[in-house]
Image (spheres, rainbow, N blue to C red):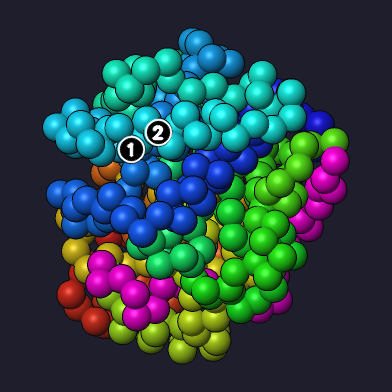
Amino acid sequence: MDSPYSHELKIAFVAIQRAAKISQSVLAQVDLGVLKKDDLSPVTIADFAIQALLTATFHAAFPSDKFVGEESAAELRENPVLLERVWSHLQQGADAGGDAEANGLCWTPESPEQACEMIDWCGSGVPGGVGTGRVWVFDPIDGTQNFVRGELYAINVALLEDGKQVLSAVGCPNLSPDATAPLMDNSLDPEGRGSIVFAVRGYGTHVRQLTGSLGDVSVRAIPRHAEEAPTLRSVTCLNTLASGLEDVHITAAERLQMPFPGCNILPWVVRYVALGLGLANTTFWVYNTRARLAKAWDHAGAMLLFEEVGGKITDVDGRDIDLTAGRKMATNYGFVAAPKNLHGLVLRTLQDVIRQDGRIEVIGSGA
């Protein structure tokens, strides 16, 4: 795909390939170094190592750019053994090699201390808005619970300019580039190729296999299947997360006469991959409280995969998604993604169900 961001994509591809090798080397170990964060989600040495790798690589290529990522290095500084394990995997990743071009583009921190510093660049970073320029947003392992279980997970790389998505590159180390619906958490690539799904605003969504240099692998453009869609096909997270009003989701799907759950996937980024690839074209999520806020790295960039095939994404109130609000998306409540021609129907139906349910106030009026 020719675009003004061809160089950024080249960097993203090699960085994701090396990040995938780190994730796989960590996965091969019995003890994943699992900790518990304040929000009780698991985090492993893979998250820390990959965030450090991505930051070092993109900083070397674009030294004026800023960064946002999920992790901070506080746990590493308090746990020298864990830091040593992270550093060991970073060094192993650097020694894993690759073609000469990849080796010249992919960088690792120069020391454990610098690795912590770069992780914290992300951990204290904010997406920003108008006038803030270029900000890279990383989720080093999206779907860490799946990762620990050997199921589908993603490495999310996004570029924002003045708070707007302009580039998305998502590495899915165990998802086939030829995946078919219904996609489930355990729908692993039988050939072990993995995939990268990527998009640039105005240039469409594409998919390639994870391995191989850009000149050696085929790239498939995804048709704009979500601009005018005849039916609704769901991707959701049924019976997996307690953060949503599951009965509201089920009732709304019944009223929309939409088979449910369809694709059933835990990680948000992989759900957007399913939407982008056309394995589904609709998802909605009503949090069980308005105090629950989404996190930028779970959505930034990955949403572009669906928007570039014609899809529309708002929150449950019908507001546009605002990535400038901060690390947590404080101006949005929940998500509604659907084909552009059917988004209004999905939004109105979901809001009607929420009103009748009565647990959550509906602020929007539909579209």
Residue 224 lies in the magenta-colored region: yes
Judge whether 162 appears above or below 275 on screen. Answer: above
Left or right: residue 55 compared with residue 10: left
Locate residue 1: give its quadrant.
top right
The residue tagged 2 is 88
Residue displayed at 81% across by 31% down: 2
Residue displayed at 33% across by 53% down: 32
The residue tagged 1 is 85
Left or right: residue 262 compared with residue 364: right
Which amino acid type corresponds to the residue marked 2 in the rendered image? Ser
Judge whether 145 appears above or below 180 on screen. Answer: above
Q: Is residue 167 visible?
A: no
Which amino acid type corresponds to the residue marked 1 in the rendered image? Arg
Q: Does the magenta stretch mainly form a helix, a strand or a loop?
A: loop
Residue 274 point in image, percent of width and height? 60, 64
**Highlighted range, magenta:** 216-243
Kindly check if marks 1 and 2 are in contact, taking CB atoms under 8 A apart as contact.
yes
Locate residue 309: give its quadrant.
bottom right
Residue 21 lies in the magenta-colored region: no
